[in-house]
Amino acid sequence: MSSLISASGLSKNYGDKLALDNISFEINEGAPVALVGPNGAGKTTLFSLMCGYIFPSAGELQILGNKPGSRQLFGQLAALPQDAQLDPRFSISHQLTFYGQLQGLSKSEANKESERVLELVGLSDVLKQKPMDLSHGMRKRATIAQALLGKPRIVMLDEATAGLDPIHAREVRELVSALSSEATFILSSHDLSELERLCGQVLHLDQGVLTEHSAQSRVSDNTHFFTLQLNQSYPNVEQVLQQLQNVNRVYMSQSKEYVVEYQKSDSAFDISLLECCHEQGWQYRQLINGHTLENQIFHKR
Amino acid sequence: MHPKRVAHIAGFELVRLFLTKRGLLSVGAFLICWLLILRYPIAESGTLLSSTEFAGFFDSVFGAIGLSKLLTWAESELAVYWLIALYSFPSFCLFLSSDQNVGDKQRGTLRFLTLRASRSEILFGRFLGQVLILALLILFTLGATLAVLSFRDPSLFATALPRSLSLFAYLLISVLPFIALMGFFNTFAGTARSAFVFAVLFFAGGGILVSLVVWQIPALGFLNLAFPGYQLDQMAGQNAGALLGIGLPLGQTFILLLLAQRVFARSAL
């Protein structure tokens, strides 16, 4: 795996406000990477720094071995910046063809490429329309399409599914999943379950401070976790689960959701857990092997 | 800078003006104004300026304001065109080129562009696009004036053509610093309107300030050279040398573009 992005001691101030505080991380080629955090945590600042829209106050940032915004990255790094809009005066295909030409494609190649990416996001039938004639969701998909032009190695999507209906949000997720072998996606979203499904590495920003997580739950050598989500609230769940063999501790992470920490043994603990649910008459909704991303980030216990 | 990307960006500016509704409306308004100018001052100039009745009057008025050389032109339509175009194109170009980058910056479209072209390429591409637009508009109005002139006296066409080419070159060079000035204001203005307001403040406020300074310290008279169009009065009467008529606007353009490039390269998008 080669390093695509590396940041070291990166800070960004807006006047007195510290938006990013001495963060360091590395992103390698491969599975999509999630960037999560509450509003104002510094996600868009980090995206903007990586795209070269703004400049760091301190530290170093390298994208494919180059400074952000350098010409070597044209066509290699694509992005959907939050709230960026296409020009309302031109048709979508006209603008995408223009972008393709700037990326070095000939007029006919750029034309074909814009048709291809618009088809990917399900907008083949409106390619001659202007952005203002489209719904919010369609406009969003058109801006996602511009990020897929050519063969970028890194695609950064800031809140790509925000404002999309569930069907199109799902289509975008499927698209990211399907294209993740061709490019490394960096996604920011408030939908943690979406990121959990798509991403391997998770960068969590809070008040400008970065922590890293794995979307595939943290597992130590001896201690393992299951997250049990029940359909409704039942009495004494924690006490009953605590009685199971090899269980170290049980706690309620949120309403109707329990984290069970257990010691690995030869027996299949998940089977015991499900049998216990059956015996108690508990209807379970989901059994997750490990922690949910949400619990990893927000319920550190 | 990659010349192909600069050319694509410049070409897109032409499309923006000639193939969009808003652009076509601006062109339409421009054409109507020039139709009136061609029909009245320019078309009537041939009769008026060659009339013996008014000869003395024009001699004294044009002489008093340093325009007597223009009266010696047999192509009087071109003389009137020159006077009107020399002052109207710079003002029109302040309006026309007030939104070089600021609209795209506000909308976020510039963020898509900077992933595909450098900021310098965008800045110079847009500048070049505006220059091409102005060149086309000047050529169009000049061509129409030539047509009016040839209609009155076809024999004048042969001498009017080379003179027109020279006027075209001088006019185009004169508008360059105005476009560059708007490009510079576009690097930090919030909207096209505020870029235009900056331009008005620059010319009005800056002009007053420099006049006061020069009044107190006459040695600082060179500060006037900072204002695009400083040479227009001299040029109007064909009294400006090459240094003033060509060197000054080219120098101003170079400095303004350099300043714009420096500010744009460091600004947050």
Image: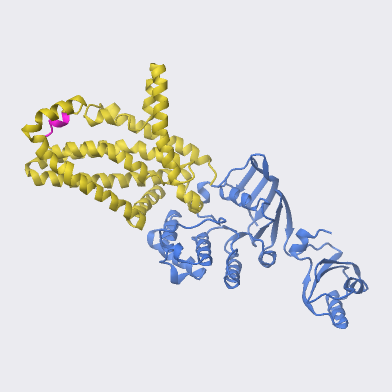
Chain colours: A blue, B yellow
User: In which image quadrant can residue B24 be found?
Assistant: bottom left
Residue B110 % position (x, y): 48, 51
In the image, the segment drawn in magenta is B69-73
Left or right: A26 as drawn, with respect to B260:
right
* Magenta stretch, main secondary structure class: helix
Residue A20 % position (x, y): 68, 46
Q: Nearer the viewer, residue A12 or B195?
A: B195
Residue A226 % position (x, y): 82, 70
Residue at 43% over, 46% down: B192
Residue at 44% over, 39% down: B185
Q: Is B165 drawn above or below residue A272 in the view shown?
A: above
Left or right: A300 as drawn, with respect to A58:
right
Left or right: A259 as drawn, with respect to A122:
right
Marks counted in the figure total 0
Residue at 35% over, 55% down: B15
User: In which image quadrant can residue A83 be found?
Assistant: bottom right
Q: Nearer the viewer, residue B82 or A179?
A: B82
Residue at 41% over, 22% down: B212
Residue A244: in sight, yes or no?
no
Where the N terminus of chain B falls, by quadrant?
A: top left
Q: Is residue B71 magenta?
A: yes
Q: Is A143 drawn above or below residue A52 in the view shown?
A: below
Residue B208: in sight, yes or no?
yes
Q: Is residue A72 magenta?
A: no
